[in-house]
Image: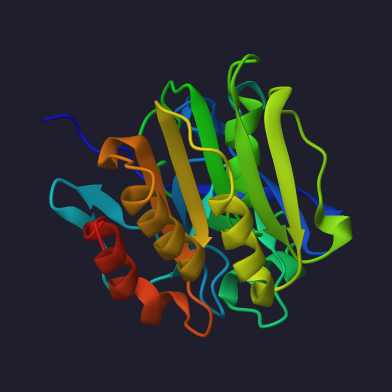
Amino acid sequence: MATPRQPVLVQVKHIHDLSPHLRCITFHHDALRDYPIERYGAHIKLFLPQVGQQKPALPAIGERGPIWPEGEARPIVRTYSVRALRPEEAELDMVFALHEHAGPAVTFARQAKPGDWVGISQPGGPLPMLPPAATYYLAADPSSLPALMALLENLPDDATGYAVIRVDSEADKLDFAKPSQLQLHWIVGGTDATDVLLQHFQSLPTVENAFYWLAGEDRIVVQLRRHVRRERGCERNQMYAVPYWREGLNEEDYHHKRHDIMDNPDE
């Protein structure tokens, strides 16, 4: 059996704001020259140092899972997406949504400076994230927008489809590369605009041989997954439906509920 690829330590290199609520941080380390390519949009674990640590203590990944170093505080772990990877420059980009109610990752993003250390896991999720399809349907919010942008930038030029995206403000409507026949529909507002997103998505025309990519806040994913399964006859292999977060819960409190949702795709 092949040895599992291990998490790596990386350093902050550049920081720039894409919008008032979205911050891109570029990480650098020579280990990224060998990081798996073509994993744009994949989820990764972000390991943040505890207070008083310069670097996070990383686990060794064995055949049975992580093995944590003894006598060291475990890092804070959050899940994010690969926004961009440039192996030739040993760089990886991640985008952070800067929420008002900041958790550890948002606090890190607000305070980050060049030279700061974090750890990142190897990328996870299906490969490819978007398999060949006649039409693509995507739904996202600020938490999943970075993954969506990475995916659309790497679709074939002749791909067609629809993406419905909720952002917090007009200034968060970003310009990025995508196939010319893939239509973007922006919904501006907080989580109180979720109903508008759901209604718009559900009004889109139904096409055979489609693929659905649904990611973001719990309610978006659960309700749209139910819609495409029951109303559009979508098979399990025609969708990627992963909730990233749930309003009112932190990642630890939401962890088991999130996996229950992913383990029961017919609910």
Q: Residue at x 56, y 80 (%)?
A: 51
Compare residues 159 and 85 and report the one nearer the observer: 159
Q: Is residue 208 above or below residue 205?
A: above
Residue 58 at x, y = what percent?
39, 58
215 with respect to 105 (left or right): left
Residue 106 in view in this figure: yes
Q: Residue at x 59, y 69 (%)?
A: 105
Residue 177 at x, y = what percent?
75, 29
Compare residues 71 and 36 and report the one nearer the observer: 36
70 with respect to 202 (left or right): left
Residue 162 image-quadrant placement: top right
34 with respect to 182 (left or right): left
**Which corner quadrant holds the C terminus?**
bottom left
Residue 28 in view in this figure: no
Q: Residue at x 27, y 42 (%)?
A: 236
The colour scheme applied to this rendered structure is: rainbow
Q: Residue furthest right?
A: 171
